[in-house]
Amino acid sequence: MDKLMKPKAFIFDLDGVITDTAHYHFLAWRDLAHGLGIEFDEVFNEKLKGVGRMESLELILEKGGKAQQFSAAEKEAMATRKNELYKALIVKMTPAEVLPNIKPLLATLRADGIKIGLASASKNAFTVLACLEMQDNFDYVADAAKIPNSKPAPDVFLDVAQAFQLQAKDCIGVEDAAAGVESIHRAGMMAVGIGDPAHLPEADVLFASTQLLDLDTIYAAYAQWLKQP
Ligand code: BG6
Ligand code: MG
């Protein structure tokens, strides 16, 4: 493959791409939702992937017909409670919870001189990376607390591109959530999806799991993507 065809950076989502924290978010939200008498399952949880904490809470309350029942302070308290539940789960994480194939893939990218960024909506991203002992695997990690608009807005992916002083077209984003794929596209980047095609119809190239991520396939898709008008 011609070196010129390769991207200059890969920008990864964290939850559901680097590690399966998506499941821990699910457990914590389910606990909170059930406490409020709101049904909560994996199907509904799909809508929350990639979506910020307060926005997720609003969606859950809306689902339960309780959107108007609480003050802003009460909602803050609920979000804090969910976050405490979530943090209790993630502090127990170990490096064994890095998803399959991620470490070798990052090693290959680094050996090829391709920058590696993290674009997570999570304010817990630094804690998760520390538990996975992966802080050194990324050249730049966006700080969700400093990003004005959360996914599907493009801000977090653009923040990483800017940190690398790269144009959007030179970066590839990797996401497991529809809101994340939209964020990548709005940033002007090619989107690699991880997961079910039914959930990620807009991804430019899709793999069912991280195990199946393949750089040659991604680079071939990228060469085609660059030719688009
Ligand atoms: C995203 C997750 O990465 O981060 C969402 O996919 C989550 O489920 C969002 O709501 C915000 O995370 P946190 O840790 O700041 O509540
Ligand atoms: Mg995700």
Image (tube, grey):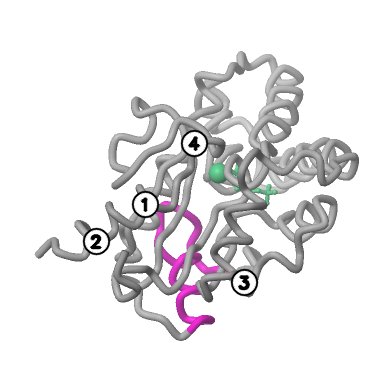
Kindly identify which residue carries mark 4: 212
- Left or right: residue 143 versus residue 149 is right
Q: Amino acid at mark 3?
A: Lys
Q: Is residue 169 left or right of residue 134?
A: left
- The residue at label 1 has a CB less than 8 Å from ligand 2: no
Q: Which mark is residue 119?
A: none
How packed mark 3 is, by other alpha carbons closer than 10 Å (few <14, some 14-19, many 20 or more), is few
Q: Is residue 117 magenta?
A: no
Task: Provide the secondary structure element on which disc 1 rests.
Answer: helix
Separation (CA) of disc 2 from disc 4: 20 Å
User: Regarding mark 4 in the picture, which secondary structure is present there?
Assistant: helix
| Residue situated in front as seen by the camera: 224 or 129 | 224
Closer to viewer: mark 3 or mark 4: 4
The amino acid marked with disc number 4 is Leu
Q: CA distance from mark 3 to mark 2?
A: 33 Å
Image location (x, y in percent) of residue 20 = 67, 36
Dot placed on the residue nearer the N-terminal end, 4 or 1? 4
Q: Position of residue 23 (x, y in %)?
A: 68, 30
Q: Secondary structure at mark 3?
A: helix
Label 2 environment density (alpha carbons within 10 Å; few <14, some 14–19, many ≥20): some
If the image is split into quadrants, where does the C terminus sit? bottom left
Q: Which mark is residue 223?
A: 2
Task: Please tell me which residue is depicted at 38% across the width and 52% down the height of the picture.
Answer: 216
State the CA–CA distance, disc 1 to disc 3. 30 Å
Give the mark nearest the N terminus, 3 or 4.
3
In front: label 1 or label 3: 1
Q: Which residue is mark 1?
A: 218
